Image: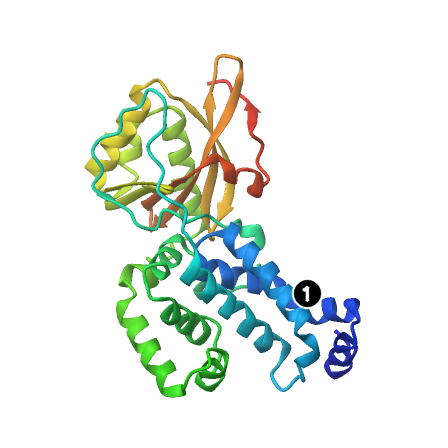
């Protein structure tokens, strides 16, 4: 970008190209910020557009005292706070898988609006620690905290803004920022912020390959052997959640007992291995029925999240594929 002061001056004069030059370098990180706050990539995209529109409409009043990035984060964060206060979150969905009678769930989840974000939208230069802050566990945990605590935690701990900057962004005091941050850190589950030691690409690849083989062949014992004792399975917007090997085994047995067989197409979501899931049909084609995201813990799978097939397009995956030969 050219001289920032010059770009700001031109943007304030109504130069659209200058405005894009000012905002484009921050678009991707703003989208991810909105996603962390809202838990839904669709809502995040909507709020990002609102943010850029508000920035354009308010550019005449922006004098450059705060850096463009700080100015944009202030707008985006407050738009997210408004969305979290007023949004009628997507309601839970009833079980609708034909011919499959699921076992009684361990519990009913509350964050049924959770959606995955493609790795293609994340910062490829992000550190491992930053990648953990887009994990499904972390994003889900954020949805259970009060909105201003979420904003404070993200702006301070994830994005590294100073307490005084955050206070100005949120129109509050430094003392209030410190208090909100302390409460947010205390309320955030340890499982959302403490990742298992990385096993390494070779081990991860082996675990993923074994999962694909087990799922394709409907081999429940092989699948269960890959799971941690406290494995967690969820399927937003359906609220059913299953905790523990036995519960997940019962669920998978019910799915495969109905004669459902799948092909899996690899992708990446939330910094985690993911797959488009395709149900085999007699026509020789397999039809997309969902998106699976795995959470790995060493050489085991500690969580499996299943999302609706509406997300396949966002990941560049087709709705149908030619069935592979077994």
- The image shows residue 55 at horizontal and vertical percentages of 64, 70
Number of marks in the image? 1
**Mark 1, residue position:** 24
Which of the 4 image quadrants contains residue 5? bottom right
How did the renderer colour the structure?
Answer: rainbow
Give me the residue at 77% from left, 67% from top: 16
- Tell me the crowding category of disc 1: few under 14, some 14 to 19, or many 20 or more residues within 10 angstroms, Cα based: few
- The image shows residue 295 at horizontal and vertical percentages of 37, 48
Position of the N terminus, as image quadrant, is: bottom right
Between residue 271 and residue 297, name the one nearer to us: 271
* Kind of element beneath mark 1: helix
In this picture, residue 270 sits left or right of residue 142: right
Which of the 4 image quadrants contains residue 292? top left
Give me the residue at 26% from left, 71% from top: 186
Q: Is residue 302 above or below residue 34?
A: above
Residue 32 visible: yes
In this picture, residue 56 sits left or right of residue 126: right
Residue 125 visible: no
In this picture, residue 137 sits left or right of residue 31: left
Which of the 4 image quadrants contains residue 195? bottom left
Q: Is residue 167 above or below residue 83?
A: below
Between residue 271 and residue 102, name the one nearer to us: 102
Give me the residue at 52% from left, 60% from top: 32
- The image shows residue 131 at horizontal and vertical percentages of 46, 60
- The image shows residue 236 at horizontal and vertical percentages of 37, 43
Q: Extreme top residue here?
A: 282
């Amino acid at each position: 970008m050219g001289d920032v002061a010059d770009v700001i001056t031109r943007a304030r004069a109504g130069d659209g190209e200058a405005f894009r030059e000012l905002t484009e370098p921050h678009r991707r990180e703003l989208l991810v910020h909105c996603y962390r706050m809202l838990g839904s990539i669709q809502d995040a995209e909507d709020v990002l557009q609102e943010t850029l529109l508000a920035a354009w409409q308010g550019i005449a009043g922006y004098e450059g005292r705060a850096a463009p990035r700080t100015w944009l984060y202030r707008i985006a964060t407050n738009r997210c706070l408004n969305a979290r206060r007023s949004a009628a979150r997507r309601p839970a969905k009833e079980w609708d898988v034909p011919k499959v009678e699921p076992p009684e769930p361990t519990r009913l989840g509350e964050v049924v609006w959770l959606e995955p974000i493609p790795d293609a939208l994340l910062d490829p230069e992000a550190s491992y620690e930053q990648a953990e802050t887009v994990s499904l566990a972390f994003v889900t945990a954020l949805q259970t905290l009060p909105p201003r605590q979420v904003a404070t935690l993200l702006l301070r701990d994830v994005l590294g803004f100073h307490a005084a900057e955050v206070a100005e962004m949120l129109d509050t005091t430094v003392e209030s920022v410190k208090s909100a941050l302390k409460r947010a850190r205390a309320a955030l589950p340890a499982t959302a912020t403490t990742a298992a030691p990385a096993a390494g690409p070779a081990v991860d690849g082996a675990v993923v390959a074994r999962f694909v083989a087990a799922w394709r062949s409907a081999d429940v014992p092989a699948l269960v052997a890959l799971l941690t004792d406290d494995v967690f399975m969820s399927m937003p917007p359906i609220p059913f959640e299953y905790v523990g090997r036995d519960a997940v085994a019962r669920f998978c047995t019910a799915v495969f007992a109905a004669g459902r067989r799948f092909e899996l197409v690899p992708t990446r979501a939330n910094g985690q291995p993911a797959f488009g899931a395709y149900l085999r049909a007699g026509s020789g084609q397999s039809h997309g029925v969902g998106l699976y995201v795995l959470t790995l813990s060493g050489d085991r799978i500690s969580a499996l999240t299943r999302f609706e097939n509406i997300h396949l397009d966002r990941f560049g995956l087709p709705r149908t594929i030619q069935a592979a030969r077994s």
